[in-house]
Every structure is written in structure tokens, then in C-alpha cells.
Amino acid sequence: MADVSAKLVKELRDQTGAGMMDCKKALKESDGDLTKASEWLRQKGIASAEKKAGRTAAEGAVGSYIHTGARVGVLVEVNCETDFVARGEQFQELVRNIAMQIAACPNVEFVTTDDIPAEVSEREAAIEMGRDDLGSKPEAMKAKIVEGRVAKRLKEISLLEQPFIKDSSMTVAEMVKQLAGKIGENIKVRRFTRYTLGEGIEVEEKDFAAEVAAVSV
């Protein structure tokens, strides 16, 4: 894959309206050729999906997934623009796939990195700043390393940044954009809740040997 300049990424972004990371990936896949990169974005449905991203998506569906053994369950709301699309097989399959993705990713807490509160970012930065391996490094270098580590951590807890469980060559965000391009509507993952059986319940630990001894007295 070719190295891609920021100027080239901006030019493709201006042409297609696609996101910066999508443009960068398209150019790498196309060896820096703008025309081929634009076609790549169109084939993936990304360019047309970005143009629709500002439109209101108030229809959609609430989907669910219960994992085998009934120990993990998920509820997720995914929005689109029309009830017709919401009832369609492709959209319903998307909702199911996203619910399964959430069940498979126990570390995920937010839909996107934009949803993460500032205090979470600040806490992660404070943790990284205290790492022993940064103690002897210059402040400017330390800040840059911490910034990179925090960005990586925030992606780890964001649903749309995860590799899609059925095709790890794309993220969940890319998978959503592809369908949005195909069906011609804005699609938005709005919120989700993940339930783990017994989570938050304090279980009293019993000393079996002590119980036996007490009974035998």
C-alpha cells in the first residue's frame, strides 16, 4: 500500500464527503489514485452514506440478542429514516448483527468515541501519566505517548470502532455505512444496554471448612 499525504486525503474528502479515515483507507487501497479511491468509496457505499449522515433518522427498531445459556443479553436501538426501511430484511439483519456484536464485546461501553464523557478521557490520561515506563521520558514525549494510548483506549470501549465479528476487515462503523449507502438512508446506532447475569450482585463467600467444623461441634 502507498503512503498517503494529508493533502491527498483532504482532496478526496472534499470530492466525496466521506470521513477522513475512510478516505485514507481508500487511497491506500488504491495506491494513491484519487479516481480509483473515489470508486472504492462508492463501491463500499461510504461516500453516499456520508452525504446522508445529516438527515434525521427517527424510525428504526429496537433489537435484542440473548446469548446461548441466557447469561448475556443485549437491547439496542438502531435508527433509519423510514418505517419501510426499518421493516426490511437488510435493516433487521443489521440490527441483529449489532446486538450480537455488543454481546461479543464486554469492554464496549459507548456507541462512539464522541459519546465518551470528558471525565473518562481525563481519568484514562491520569492513569497513563502514572505508568512507570514514562517516568524518565521528557514531558513533551510523555504527553504524546499518553495521547496515543488514551485514543487507543477510547476506541476499545466504543462500539463503532470494533472490528465487525463477521468480517474483521471492516469496523462496525464501516459495516453500517455500507448498508446506508445501499438502502439510501441515514442509519444511526443510538444506544444499547448489555445485561450480564448476576452482574452487580454481591455474593457472600462461605468458608466450607468452617461450616463443617461448626456443624460437627
Image: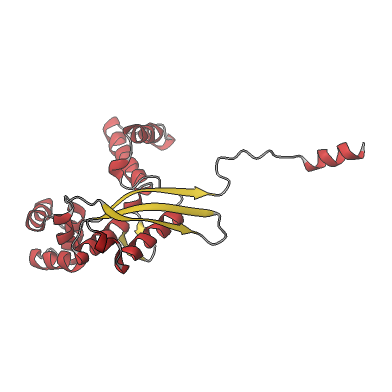
Q: Can you see residue 34? A: yes
Furthest residue in direction right, as rendered = 217
Q: In the image, is 143 to the left or to the right of 109?
A: left
> Looking at the image, how many numbered discs can be counted on the residues?
0
Residue 26: quadrant of the picture: bottom left
Q: Residue at x 29, y 34 (%)?
A: 143
- Seen at 38% across and 46% down, the residue is 157
Q: Residue at x 19, y 63 (%)?
A: 181
Name above or below for residue 168 compared with residue 141.
below
Seen from the viewer's position, the closer of residues 171 and 78 is: 78
Can you give x and y, in whole percent of width and height, for residue 83 in the image? 26, 59
* Residue sitting at x 51%, y 59%: 67
Give percent across and percent down for residue 32.
12, 63
Colouring chosen for the image of the structure: secondary structure
**In the foreground, 147 or 90:** 90
Quadrant assignment, res 176: bottom left
Judge from the rendering whether residue 205 lies leftward or rightward of residue 62; answer left or right: right
Picture coordinates of residue 60, whole percent (x, y): 30, 56
